[in-house]
Image (cartoon, rainbow, N blue to C red):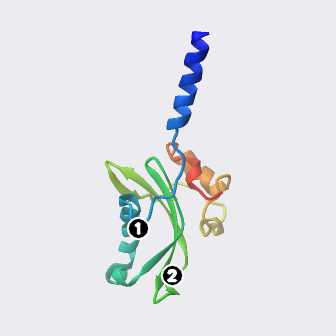
């Protein structure tokens, strides 16, 4: 009986602490750090670019972000998505396509789905990357 109670409490505890993907709050340190990395791509124009966040899920040390850069409320470039990993307390963009073979390039355009081919390839390459950061 005591063993069952112990196992039950253990399972409840593990379930409570299991992390799930979440959207970081606007203004949070994590959100600012990651969006600032994306802004750097625009060089001198980075302060003129507004980034509309279309998808932003974070779980542990991984984040998947899809954004549409805007300038004067007009789409400045095509929407794009990126993968980030926190290394040594610092967020870094992950160049995930390196070493992955693709049959066709069109799959890179859209945000990977949790059960999609690209998401599976990423998680296969980076086993610590949680599948739930990708779009459902």
Q: Which residue is mark 2?
A: 77
Corner quadrant of residue 39: bottom left
Judged by depth in the image, the label closer to the viewer, 2 or 1, is 1
| Quarter of the rendering occupied by the N terminus | top right
Residue 136 in picture, x, y percent from top left? 66, 57
Q: Nearer the viewer, residue 130 or 12?
A: 12
Q: Residue at x 61, y 15 (%)?
A: 4
- For this view, does 104 lie left or right of residue 86? right
> Vertically, is 10 above or below 25?
above
Instruction: Determine which of the numbered discs, if any, sits on residue 68 in the image.
Output: none
Q: Residue at x 49, y 87 (%)?
A: 73
Instruction: Determine which of the numbered discs, if any, sits on residue 35 in the image.
Output: 1
> Vertically, is 11 above or below 40?
above
Q: Does the residue at mark 2 contact the one at mark 1 (Cβ under 8 Å)?
A: no
Q: Nearer the viewer, residue 1 or 20?
A: 1
Q: CA distance from mark 2 to mark 1?
A: 15 Å
Q: Tell me which label, 2 or 1, sits earlier in the chain.
A: 1
- For this view, does 133 lie left or right of residue 86? right
Residue 130 in picture, x, y percent from top left? 54, 47
Q: Residue at x 66, y 55 (%)?
A: 117
Q: Check disc 1 and report its element: helix, strand or loop.
A: helix
Farthest residue, direction top? 1
Mark 2 burial class by Cα count in 10 Å: few <14, some 14-19, many 20+? few
Q: Check disc 2 and report its element: helix, strand or loop.
A: loop
Q: Residue at x 55, y 17 (%)?
A: 6
Q: Nearer the viewer, residue 135 or 99?
A: 135
Mark 1 burial class by Cα count in 10 Å: few <14, some 14-19, many 20+? some
């Amino acid at each position: 009986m005591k063993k069952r109670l112990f196992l039950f409490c253990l399972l409840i505890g593990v379930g409570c602490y299991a992390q799930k993907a979440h959207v970081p709050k606007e203004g949070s340190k994590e959100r600012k750090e990651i969006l600032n990395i994306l802004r750097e791509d625009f060089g001198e124009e980075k302060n003129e670019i507004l980034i509309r966040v279309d998808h932003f899920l974070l779980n542990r040390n991984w984040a998947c972000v899809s954004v549409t850069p805007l300038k004067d409320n007009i789409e400045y470039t095509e929407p794009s998505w990126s993968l980030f990993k926190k290394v040594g307390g610092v967020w870094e963009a992950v160049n995930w396509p390196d070493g992955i073979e693709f049959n066709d390039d069109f799959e890179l355009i859209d945000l990977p789905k949790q059960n999609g081919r690209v998401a599976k390839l990423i998680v296969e390459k980076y086993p610590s990357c949680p599948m739930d950061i990708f779009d459902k």
